[in-house]
Amino acid sequence: MKTKRLAVAFSGPSNSGKTTAIVKISNILQDSGFKVCIIKHDPKDKAMFDRVGKDSYKFGETGADVAVVSPNKTTLMKKETSSIEELIYLFNDFDYLLVEGLKTLDLPRISIFRNSIDKTYLKFTHAIACDETINNDDIPSSIDKLNLNSPEDIIIWIDKNAKRV
């Protein structure tokens, strides 16, 4: 069966609900038999994957790129950033690629807001997923409105608007 290879990005301020939304969407898609890949942007370089004292940490300290391969997963740690194209090539076989962050990336983008809309996101935004704390009249008419509490509605939007990569 041919994969869909649909990519979409999510943006929004810290604690707006991006990760929660992506997790819900990913679970629904995977429960429906689709293969999902997720890319998380870590602009402050604070995510930790290897722990001090562990072999993977010692290998990384040498300055080398490191891959940790186990029966159920592969963890790749490169000492430089990766382009979206490199990651798409690495993942290769997927139906949905969900990207959190990287707001200048040329992908259809859902911005997530609660309590207030940060207008700095609007020039990169194709749809806004929000809850009842946002007044729909505050959302520009050129931007699609989605219910943050309905991941199924967000998936329908993704199927119609995501970029095939």
Image: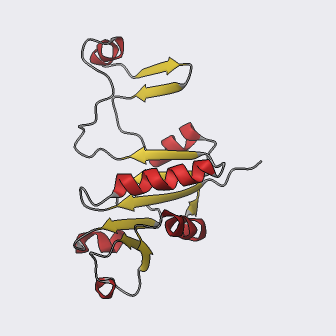
Left or right of 153? Residue 118 is left
Query: Which residue is found at the position 28% from the left and 61% from the top?
Result: 16
In the depicted view, which residue is nearer to us: 155 or 102?
155
Query: Which residue is found at the position 47% from the left and 62% from the top?
Result: 107
Is residue 47 in sight in this rendering? yes
Q: Could you say where residue 139 lies in the image, as x and y percent from the top left?
A: 33, 82
Residue 155 position (above or below residue 38)? below
Residue 35 position (above or below residue 112)? above
Is residue 97 in sight in this rendering? no
Query: Which residue is found at the position 54% from the left and 64% from the top?
Result: 155
Q: Could you say where residue 95 lies in the image, as x and y percent from the top left?
A: 62, 51
Q: Could you say where residue 135 lies in the image, as x and y percent from the top left?
A: 29, 83
Q: Could you say where residue 40 lies in the image, as x and y percent from the top left?
A: 38, 46
Residue 95 position (above or below residue 149)? above
Residue 62, quarter of picture: top left
Residue 66, quarter of picture: top left
Query: Which residue is found at the position 47% from the left and 46% from the top?
Result: 38
The colour scheme is secondary structure
In the depicted view, which residue is nearer to us: 119 or 83?
119
How many tags in the picture? 0
For the C terminus, which image quadrant? Answer: bottom right
Q: Residue furthest right?
A: 1
